[in-house]
Image (cartoon, grey):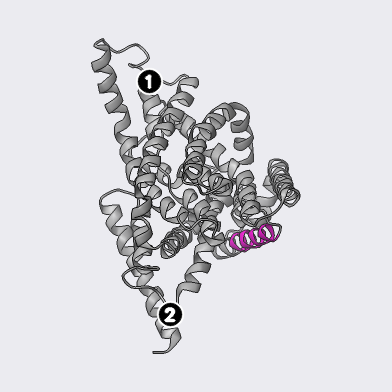
């Protein structure tokens, strides 16, 4: 059979399969990410039916998927929001990093993988899944809850940290020395700072330049600008994903809203391709040997995320029930953990890191929505039994606030 025909058959089967898996996940109201990863395992190295001619195209689609994921995330926030979050919520961000990055680093060192793998695995366990968490908050009707701004602030700080973290691991994985790595980080911080300043002062002018009443022209300009900036960023060894994230931050108002609606289907398509691509490069036979460490890491970091959310919500004056809800909601890991692990897999620093990250994300992307739903009632029941007393006034505080406190769209 002609190679182009094989390519169309293979790629068409992948897209059709992803659509059916997404529909299946939607029917049972859980994230399709674990199903996409399992699909990649089935069609990858050592899987049931390894791909042939379409793998290179899938790799390109996966890279676009990462770029669109970060662009859409940047569109959710304005530069002013980011600056405000940095000023008011940075202690919660520091606690989040300490409690959730250290277990990953410690596990890598215990397994004898070395310091570079430790930095990578620290990022895998640190970053929560903004996509999964946003969907869970909507599904559970908690967008108006008092603890939701606290949750979103932590997610924003994590996303901002990516602008610093990704260049660091990019330099480490490339084997750059101290001078080269410091130069890369300096460039990354300089570019990020410059974009934030430009976005705050000239964001309206940029949005007016990009804006168009024609959806086709708006889509082409935003997508073209994003890919261009991502490519320049990667050429500077800053990270294409960070470049896309900064483009999203720079756009605001009607442009951001319009671009969000136009790009959402493309993001969902290429993000699904990205998860499949990650699974393609993970041999299913390599997962069982790392399943026990992945499970232990999942248990520990689920607990540390709950502790992070509880502490941050308590600091913000949220009731005890809201503190448990905040902690349980933050447990899910997903796209960003896979993005970080994917960089390590392509560099080849540690062959077992990819399988461990896959197993870890599979566990927590399933457990995360469950902890979001049940952490508060389980904790309330357990504490009620241990105290044997009536609820305190703080515990009787209403769960909801007026809709004006719900997170505003960009």
Find residue 375 and report its horizontal and vertical position in percent: 32, 31
Q: Is residue 260 above or below residue 193?
A: below
Q: Quadrant where the N terminus lies?
A: bottom left
Residue closest to the eye, 300 or 333: 300
Which residue: 37% across, 46% down? 365
Residue under label 1, please give it. 320
Type of secondary structure dominating the magenta stretch: helix
- Front residue of this view, candidates 295 and 205: 295
Residue drawn where x is 50% and y is 53% of the image = 341
Residue 211 pos. (x, y %): 62, 55
| Residue in view at x 29 percent, y 48 percent | 29
Q: Which residues are magenta?
A: 221-235
Magenta span contains residue 302: no
For disc 2, the marked residue is 7
Residue 308 visible somewhere in the drawing: yes
Q: Position of residue 296 (x, y in %)?
A: 37, 40
Q: Is residue 1 left or right of residue 187?
A: left
């Amino acid at each position: 059979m002609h190679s182009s025909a094989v390519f169309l058959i293979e790629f068409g089967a992948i897209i059709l399969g992803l659509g059916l898996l997404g529909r299946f996940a939607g029917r049972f109201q859980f994230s399709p990410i674990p199903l996409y990863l399992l699909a990649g395992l089935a069609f990858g190295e050592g899987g049931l039916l390894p791909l042939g001619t379409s793998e290179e195209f899938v790799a390109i689609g996966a890279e676009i998927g990462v770029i669109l994921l970060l662009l859409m995330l940047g569109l959710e926030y304005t530069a002013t929001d980011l600056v405000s979050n940095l000023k008011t919520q940075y202690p919660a961000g520091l606690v989040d990093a300490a409690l959730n990055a250290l277990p990953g680093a410690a596990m890598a060192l215990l397994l004898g993988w070395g310091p570079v793998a430790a930095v990578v695995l620290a990022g895998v366990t640190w970053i929560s899944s903004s996509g999964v968490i946003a969907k869970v908050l909507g599904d559970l009707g908690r967008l108006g809850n008092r603890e939701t701004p606290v949750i979103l602030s932590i997610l924003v700080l994590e996303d901002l940290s990516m602008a610093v973290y990704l260049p660091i691991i990019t330099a480490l994985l490339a084997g750059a020395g101290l001078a080269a790595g410091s130069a890369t980080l300096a460039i990354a911080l300089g570019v990020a700072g410059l974009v934030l300043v430009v976005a705050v002062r000239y964001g309206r002018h940029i949005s007016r330049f990009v804006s168009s009443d024609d959806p086709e022209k708006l889509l082409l300009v935003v997508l073209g600008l994003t890919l261009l900036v991502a490519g320049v960023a990667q050429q500077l060894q800053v990270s294409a994903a960070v470049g896309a994230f900064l483009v999203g931050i720079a756009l605001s108002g009607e442009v951001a809203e319009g671009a969000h609606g136009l790009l959402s289907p493309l993001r969902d398509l290429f993000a699904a391709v990205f998860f499949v691509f990650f699974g393609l490069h993970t041999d299913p036979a390599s997962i069982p040997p790392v399943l026990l460490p992945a499970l232990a890491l999942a248990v520990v970091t689920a607990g540390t995320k709950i502790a992070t959310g509880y502490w941050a919500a308590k600091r913000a004056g949220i009731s005890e029930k809201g503190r448990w809800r905040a902690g349980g909601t933050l447990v899910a890991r997903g796209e960003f953990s896979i993005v970080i692990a994917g960089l390590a897999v392509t560099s080849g620093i540690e062959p077992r890191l990819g399988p461990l990250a896959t197993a870890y994300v599979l566990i927590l992307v399933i457990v995360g929505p469950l902890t979001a739903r049940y952490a508060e009632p389980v904790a309330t029941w357990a504490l009620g039994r241990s105290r044997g007393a009536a609820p305190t006034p703080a515990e009787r505080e209403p769960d909801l606030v007026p809709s004006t406190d719900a997170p505003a769209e960009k």
